[in-house]
Amino acid sequence: MSIPRAPLPAALVICLFSARPEWMDAATSQLTTRFGPTLEASPPLPFTETAYYVAEFGTPLTRRILRFARLIPQDTLAQIKLDCIEVEAAQSEAGQRRVNIDPGLLTAERFILATAKNRPHRVPLASGIFADLTLIFERDSLQPLPWTYPSWRSPEIIDLLNRFRAGYIVQLKGEGHLPCAAGEDKTCSGA
């Protein structure tokens, strides 16, 4: 018989992209006001895997991926996405978004993005928000799935998220969420 247990808290990871660095900076400031400080951030990265957003945002598109310091309950992802939609709206001008914000949860096992777009592989959470299982951890690295967007498949992004994951596991240990005594199971190492 399985016994329900609360899942470990997750690392909040948010990806932003925009055509203007100052718009991304303003949105980042609003996000840190809502979710606290960041622990890690990617450098500005070109967002060239798709032309889907060019008409809305212009070019060149640049993205930044942030890992926030505070670990969060996994069942808060839908509300976090709704909060990010509010930040997008606050940054909009004349009804047009200036920044796109995609929040996700990073755990030892997976990376899940939140979205308001339904697809066959997405699971409804609450308030019109869906969970998109984007990457899974196996063979010592995060791995894409058949439906993973190209922007999350690149070796550079997977390497970045693997580093974020390693930091997350150290943080779990430091906050007492994982057993780490010698001789305990592989849970401590995140394997």
Image (cartoon, grey):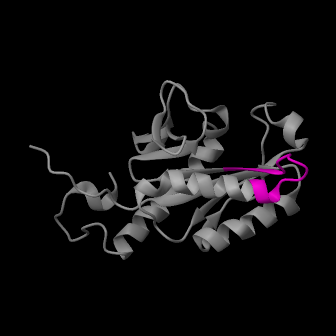
Does 110 sit above or below residue 40?
Answer: above
Q: Is residue 111 left or right of residue 1?
A: right
67 or 143, which lies in front? 67
Residue 74 colored in magenta in the image: no
Q: Position of residue 139 (x, y in %)?
A: 39, 39
Furthest residue in direction front, as rendered = 127
Q: Position of residue 172 (x, y in %)?
A: 38, 68
Furthest residue in direction left, as rendered = 1
Q: Is residue 164 left or right of residue 20?
A: left
Instruction: Give the magenta range.
Output: 89-101
Q: Is residue 39 left or right of residue 86?
A: left
Q: Which quadrant, please, contains the N terminus? A: top left
Residue 98 colored in magenta in the image: yes
Whether residue 117 is visible, yes or no, is: yes
Q: Position of residue 114 (x, y in %)?
A: 55, 45
Which quadrant of the figure has residue 37?
Answer: bottom right
* Residue at image coords 62%, 32%: 149
State the count of labels: 0
Which quadrant of the figure has residue 65?
Answer: bottom right
157 or 58, which lies in front? 58
* Residue at image coords 72%, 68%: 30
* Residue at image coords 50%, 30%: 145
* Residue at image coords 80%, 66%: 26
Q: Position of residue 66 (x, y in %)?
A: 64, 60
Which quadrant of the figure has residue 128?
Answer: top right
85 or 10, which lies in front? 85
Whether residue 163 is visible, yes or no, is: no
